[in-house]
Amino acid sequence: MKKLLNTLYALSEDLYLSLDGENVVANRDKQELARYPLHTLQSIISFSYAGLSPALMGECANRGIGVALCSPRGRFLARVCGEINGNVLLRREQYRTADDEAGSCRIARCMIFGKLYNSRWSIERTKRDHGMRVDGEALSNASAQIKELLPKVLDETSLDGLRGLEGNGANAYFGVLDQLILNDKGVFSFNGRSRRPPLDPVNAMLSFAYSILAHDCASALEASGLDPYVGFLHRDRPGRMSLALDLMEELRPCMADRFVLTLINNRVMDEKDFIRQESGVVLLNDDGRRKFFKYWQDKKREGLTHPYLGEKLQWGMVPYIQAQLLARYLRGDLDDYPPFLWK
């Protein structure tokens, strides 16, 4: 079983990471600030203009340590990976399935079922725990709409039809997301999804969480021998990690959305953690990102019982388990891909 290790986040714009023996060294103006043993790291995500040394990138690729390069404001730029893991037969089966709409749809509908199921459970959980503080009727109506879509998803045989059902479910879910925000509504109100760019603090955190989750899913797929760029629901596009986006669909409501809601409802984040630009764009500032990543790492270490395997594991291992289950399905060891159904 793969062990959950640490992710090193380089947040300062002028931080330069280099290699010294078995350690990553963080430098600023040629002065050493800190060092981190390589054997404790699972991945490195850099938000620095200075970036990483070629020697460090090469050693990370050799050891299978994922490296992602982002702009200081969080826009994904590139990933660095080493030799492809897994056997060629698994990837050839992945490519054949991706070229077949029926085969792609069979996997994609399981993932969309998981996304809608987890979206509905997130609504139901808030209604159960905070029934006196929310509009119960609005939440019940949204939950009922999503529930009605679940059997339709399992019966759908076209990718376009699946996208339409997923869109209907997303509209119902995001239509009541503001009801799931319980504190500081003056700062953290949600009036709809704005992606590129985010126009309010909630969307800024959602987009940031999705970027980090996509990186984790891509690393999990590569570790399982799959190609993160060849998806089933998300089709081929140069530079897009389509399969990573597929895999994260079912994890968005329970790993990303609930995490953002927890930061808000527990009053972890506040107005001073964001930058509001004249254009209307809202982004996390340096202190906000540090706070975000600290709690994200804590969340990944929390325990749960996997609903399909019945085994206890950490939240951070969920993308790896789902990637392994997908690989087992493609190899023919499972009759269907079992999505992660949050309980």
Image (tube, helix red, strand yellow):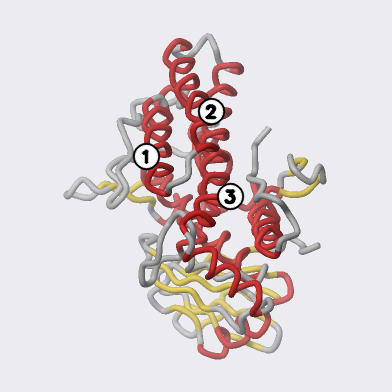
Marks 3 and 2 sit apart, C-alpha to C-alpha, by 23 Å
Q: Earlier in the sequence, mark 1 or mark 3?
A: 1
- The reply to whether discs 1 and 3 touch (Cβ–Cβ < 8 Å) is no
Q: Which residue is mark 2?
A: 120
Q: Which mark is residue 202?
A: none
Residue at the spot 75% in from the left edge and 43% down from the top edge: 308
Q: Which residue is mark 3?
A: 296
Residue at the spot 68% in from the left edge and 81% down from the top edge: 63
| Residue 168 in view, yes or no | yes
Label 3, residues with CA under 10 Å away: few <14, some 14-19, many ≥20 = some
Q: Amino acid at mark 1?
A: Gly
Residue 338, horizontal then vertical, whole percent: 67, 46
| Quadrant (top left/top right/bottom left/bottom right) for the N terminus | bottom right
Front in this rendered view, residue 270 or 219? 219
Label 1: element kind? helix
Residue 111 placement, left or right of 335:
left
* Looking at the image, residue 314 lies above or below residue 135: below
Q: Amino acid at mark 2?
A: Arg
* Looking at the image, residue 301 lies above or below residue 67: above
Front in this rendered view, residue 340 or 197? 340
Residue 211, horizontal then vertical, whole percent: 45, 56
Marks 1 and 2 sit apart, C-alpha to C-alpha, by 17 Å
Residue at the spot 65% in from the left edge and 36% down from the top edge: 342
Residue 18, horizontal then vertical, whole percent: 55, 84
| Quadrant (top left/top right/bottom left/bottom right) for the C terminus | top right
Depth check, mark 1 against mark 3: the one in front is 1
Residue at the spot 51% in from the left edge and 47% down from the top edge: 249
Label 1, residues with CA under 10 Å away: few <14, some 14-19, many ≥20 = few
Q: Which mark is residue 164?
A: 1
Marks 1 and 3 sit apart, C-alpha to C-alpha, by 31 Å
